Image (spheres, rainbow, N blue to C red):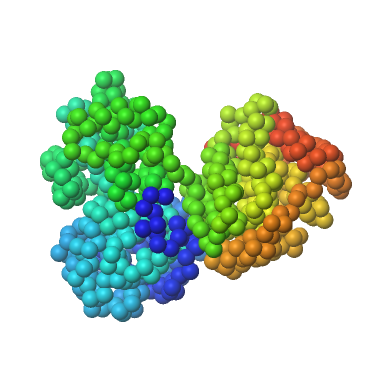
């Protein structure tokens, strides 16, 4: 990872940090304008029982914020994402105030006032005179480097910039700026705190606009400079190939024209080429339709706009990577979860191919001289793991699956990346073993990415091939000489559980759960789920029947009772440390999955099989039962696994699979007819 260790002095996975202080007992947000209330709402969602102060100099914005919070909770209740009592807890203990003195007991304060340096300096001076000497104080500036705001503080080491993204109550992204005045404890604590309360924070260097705003503001500025070539609506339509909302639509949402002018002016400290478009000074709102609206764009215009937008995007990505402003992993990830890009910018480059990227970069250099160019050969920018964070603790590689936006669901690339890490380290004597865990405190992994299944429906060979491909990692693990331990930090579902049970040991957080929900989608666990559990923990066969055929979920405690999990931990840190112990304990004695025919109890199917309230498909169940029985009767493990792959091919051809997968993707309950 380029420059990664300079930014991340402790760990890439924030959950590996042992926090040096407790969660805040009271917290405050200063500024009830556009983003302040959204930050406050996020804080209160993450810590509903904690008192929160929202401070402003005027009553009106505070009243509006209160109204906004009620609307957010009502929407969440309507979408069944929140219960009434959760909404009540969230809205309780929020103090809307114009009195700064009220926040004197807060140990975390986030400033989200107007983007104005003297004002921010004044606020920090005031805050320091009110709160205790060790309260953490941060600024949500989107562009002003931390030292300019915070150096005059009496105790700057407890302060930094923490930059949120709209909508801040929901967007996973937040940048924690690692500047030289902050203590390592402060950076580590904030990095850990945001992750623990539901965000996916990244650490960046202390430069103008940090990491993601260098992408966003230059992208929008380029769009404005293109207005002599195309209309705002046309530019938004072209950008729609890459982002959920075009640049002008997004700026309208935040009334961002004046601030764009200001921050792009600030960037001119790095060169005149960053000059903002003057039009930001005269336009209040852009005449653009909602994203997805059909807009006619002549082909030559489309090509021109597309090249220029990609030109600035790539230029900024090379610069961020070359200067070590952030890691490529974070940049690629954050553009997706924070800026609404469908694919990360490095993935866009990969898919375009080296020749096309070079053409775009060269053209851009001619049209917009001065902007940063790549300092290294283009292929070297592709050399990183898209979905994994890899840390080293005492000679053990901790592999964290980071895809929180999809509950760490496993796609083909994740499986390949994990396999690559295992292979890269297989022969290194200093690496003792591996721990695989999931990012966040909700899911180890919500299973195979359901989005990959529609293309295999009705195609036996394609479905079996997909299962076989996704199994390569697991088959490799079966013959490894170094131990791999799964640390189950939340839900381990479907393919996530299949990955976990192929690890050589398993530890879990106490709230972790284990489930094979495949039958509720009309499909089968295809990569060993119908095979391996019976062979590794034969006494629990009746329980596995229930888990596989009726999607019964078990707790960490139950998983420990059947011997699947060796330690149930109270918190993430303890879980990781138990996993490290387990790696040591297993050492070179990797348990082998038994070969040969095994005997399993009969599977009894009721007349009306159900999983919870969902009536299951009898057709799919009969395929499933056959897979389990045939695999148990197989002479070798390889043969049994192959029965599982082919079985997932058979089940993909049922009506149940089509209905189950379609229903999930359409966000409705499945209705199985036979
Ligand atoms: N594949 C692809 N995306 C998945 C996924 C999976 N296996 N599991 C979750 N996601 C995505 C959701 O589609 C959603 O994306 P969106 O925000 O773009 O809509 C996001 O992760 C969050 O999930 P959501 O369902 O909104 O969260 P929840 O808390 O209401 O429910 C689960 C969480 C895990 C119970 C639910 O997502 C689920 O049932 N997932 C499928 C599990 C499964 O059947 N796995 C086996 C696959 S073979």
Q: Position of residue 356 (x, y in %)?
A: 35, 26
Spot the residue most to the front: 429
Residue 511 appears anywhere in the view:
no
Q: Nearer the viewer, residue 531 or 491?
A: 531
- Image point 58% across, 29% down: which residue? 455
Query: Quadrant of the rendered structure where residue 178 is?
Result: bottom left
Horizontal side of 417 relative to 518 (left or right) equals: left
Residue at (30%, 71%) from the top-left corner?
Answer: 157
449 lies above or below 292: below
State the image coordinates of residue 112 (x, y, percent, origin top left): 27, 61
Pick the front one: 397 or 196: 397
**350 to the left or right of 399:** left
Check the image and name the residue furthest to the top. 299
Residue 484 shows in this picture: yes
Position of residue 1 relative to residue 413, above or below, is: below
Residue ID at (49%, 56%): 391
- Find residue 170 and report its horizontal and vertical position in percent: 40, 53
Q: Is residue 136 left or right of residue 422?
A: left
Residue 653: x and y in percent read 69, 28
What is the quadrant of residue 453 in the picture?
top right
Residue at coordinates 64% horizontally, 60% vertically from top-left?
583
Q: Could you tell me which quadrant the C terminus lies in?
A: top right
Q: Residue 155: which quarter of the image?
A: bottom left
Count of number-bearing discs: 0
């Amino acid at each position: 990872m380029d420059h990664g260790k300079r930014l991340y002095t402790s760990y890439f996975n924030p959950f590996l940090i042992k926090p040096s202080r407790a969660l805040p007992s009271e917290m405050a947000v200063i500024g009830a304008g556009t983003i302040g209330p959204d930050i406050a709402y996020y804080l209160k969602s993450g810590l509903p029982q904690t008192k929160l102060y929202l401070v402003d100099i005027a009553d009106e914005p505070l009243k509006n914020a209160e109204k906004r919070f009620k609307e957010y909770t009502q929407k969440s209740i309507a979408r069944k994402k929140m219960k009434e009592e959760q909404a009540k807890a969230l809205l309780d203990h929020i103090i809307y105030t114009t009195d700064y003195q009220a926040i004197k007991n807060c140990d975390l304060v986030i400033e989200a006032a107007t983007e104005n340096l003297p004002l921010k300096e004044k606020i920090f001076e005031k805050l320091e005179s009110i709160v205790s000497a060790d309260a953490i104080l941060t600024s949500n500036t989107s562009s002003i480097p931390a030292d300019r705001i915070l150096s005059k503080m009496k105790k700057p080491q407890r302060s930094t910039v923490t930059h949120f993204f709209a909508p801040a109550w929901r967007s996973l992204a937040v940048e924690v700026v690692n500047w030289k005045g902050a203590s390592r404890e402060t950076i580590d604590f904030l990095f850990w705190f945001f992750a623990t309360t539901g965000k996916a924070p990244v650490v960046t260097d202390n430069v103008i606009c940090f990491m993601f705003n260098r992408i966003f503001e230059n992208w929008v500025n380029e769009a404005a400079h293109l207005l002599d070539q195309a209309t705002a609506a046309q530019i938004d339509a072209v950008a729609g190939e890459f982002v959920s909302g075009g640049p002008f639509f997004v700026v309208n949402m935040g009334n961002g024209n004046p601030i764009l002018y200001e921050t792009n002016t600030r960037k001119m400290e790095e060169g005149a080429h960053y000059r903002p478009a003057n039009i930001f000074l005269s336009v209040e709102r852009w005449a653009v339709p909602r994203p997805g609206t059909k807009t006619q764009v002549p082909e030559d215009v489309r090509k021109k706009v597309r090249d220029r937008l990609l030109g600035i995007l790539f230029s900024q990505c090379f610069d961020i990577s070359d200067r070590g402003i952030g890691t490529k992993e974070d940049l690629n990830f954050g553009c997706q979860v924070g800026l609404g890009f469908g694919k990360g910018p490095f993935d866009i480059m990969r898919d375009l191919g080296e020749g096309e990227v070079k053409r775009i970069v060269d053209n851009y250099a001619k049209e917009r001289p001065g902007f940063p160019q790549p300092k290294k050969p283009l292929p070297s920018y592709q050399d990183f793991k898209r979905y994994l964070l890899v840390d080293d603790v005492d000679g053990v590689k901790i592999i964290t699956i980071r895809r929180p936006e999809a509950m760490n669901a496993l796609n083909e690339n994740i499986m390949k990346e994990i396999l690559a890490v295992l292979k890269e380290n297989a022969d290194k004597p200093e690496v003792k073993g591996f721990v695989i865990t999931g990012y966040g405190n909700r899911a180890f992994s919500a299973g195979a990415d359901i989005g990959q299944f529609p293309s295999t429906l009705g195609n036996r060979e394609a479905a079996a091939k997909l299962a076989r491909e996704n199994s390569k990692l697991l088959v490799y693990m079966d013959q490894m000489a170094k131990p791999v331990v799964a640390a189950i930090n939340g839900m381990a579902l479907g393919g996530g559980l299949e990955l976990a049970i192929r690890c050589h040991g398993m530890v879990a957080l106490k709230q972790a759960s284990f489930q094979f929900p495949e039958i509720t989608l009309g499909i089968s666990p295809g990569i060993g789920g119908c095979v391996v559990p019976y062979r590794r923990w034969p006494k629990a066969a009746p329980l596995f029947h229930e888990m596989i055929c009726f999607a019964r979920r078990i707790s960490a405690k139950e998983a420990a009772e059947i011997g699947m999990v060796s330690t149930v931990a109270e918190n993430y840190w303890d879980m990781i440390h138990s996993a490290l112990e387990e790696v040591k304990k297993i050492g070179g004695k990797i348990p082998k999955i038994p070969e040969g025919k095994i005997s399993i109890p009969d599977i009894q199917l009721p007349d009306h099989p159900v999983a919870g309230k969902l009536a299951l498909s009898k057709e799919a169940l009969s395929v499933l039962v056959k897979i389990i029985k045939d695999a148990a009767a197989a002479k070798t493990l390889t043969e049994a696994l192959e029965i599982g792959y082919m079985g997932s091919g058979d089940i993909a051809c049922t009506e149940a699979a089509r209905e189950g997968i379609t229903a999930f993707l359409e966000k409705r309950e499945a209705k199985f007819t036979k």
